[in-house]
Image (tube, helix red, strand yellow):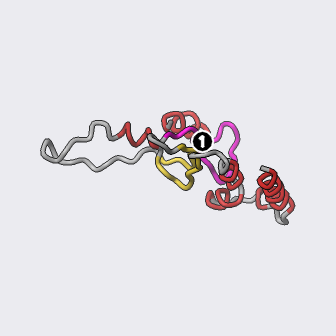
Amino acid sequence: MYEHVRTTIMDWVRLLEMQPNLLTLEMSECWYHVNVWRTIDIAFLDIPFTYVVGGEKAGLVCSKRKNQYRTLANVEPIQRKAVGKKGDGYVRTIGSTSTDWVASEAGPKWEGVHGTKLMKECGLSLPRTL
């Protein structure tokens, strides 16, 4: 645990002290995943059977819900398998059944509490993914 805390602090200090400060510039979501959200990935390494899934993956429950009425081709033309809502990150446990515990959505720029992405993703999409 000590090593994680030390590495996290060093990473964040490095990001804050860079000139120009990259945290104030418009960077891509991928940049934030690699440089900022990495600390969250590391935080879950010590928890058995738990990991962080990142990079626009579909939530387990959302995919299952969208495909519950899918039928075989002998009844009617087969439907393509629906993919669930794609979030930017999930904290997932594996075992006899896999479960998503946390869903996250990231954006390249903070638009404030009334920003479209915040209102749409946090208010409508994220609650339905779990």
From this view, report whether residue 49 is shown above or below residue 11: above
Is residue 113 inside the magenta stretch? yes
Task: Compare residues 101 and 58 and report the one nearer the observer.
Answer: 101
Q: Residue at x 48, y 43 (%)?
A: 95
Specify the principal SS of the magenta part. loop
Q: Position of residue 54 (x, y in %)?
A: 57, 53
Report the residue that reaches farthest toward the bottom. 19
In the image, 8: left or right of 117? right
Q: Badge 1 local density, few (<14 within 10 Å), some, or many (20+)?
A: few
Q: How many marks?
A: 1
Q: Residue at x 43, y 39 (%)?
A: 62
Q: Amino acid at mark 1?
A: Thr
Task: Compare residues 62 and 18 and report the one nearer the observer.
Answer: 62
Q: Residue under label 1, please give it.
A: 116
Q: Position of residue 91 (x, y in %)?
A: 58, 44
Q: Quadrant of residue 26?
A: bottom right
Q: Position of residue 66 (x, y in %)?
A: 36, 39
Label 1 element class: helix
Task: Compare residues 111 and 38 and report the one nearer the observer.
Answer: 38
From this view, report whether residue 33 is shown above or below residue 70: below
In magenta, the rendered stretch is: 99-116
In the image, 46: left or right of 56? right
Q: Residue at x 64, y 45 (%)?
A: 47
In the image, 52: left or right of 74? right
Q: Position of residue 97 (x, y in %)?
A: 44, 40
Is residue 73 inside the magenta stretch? no
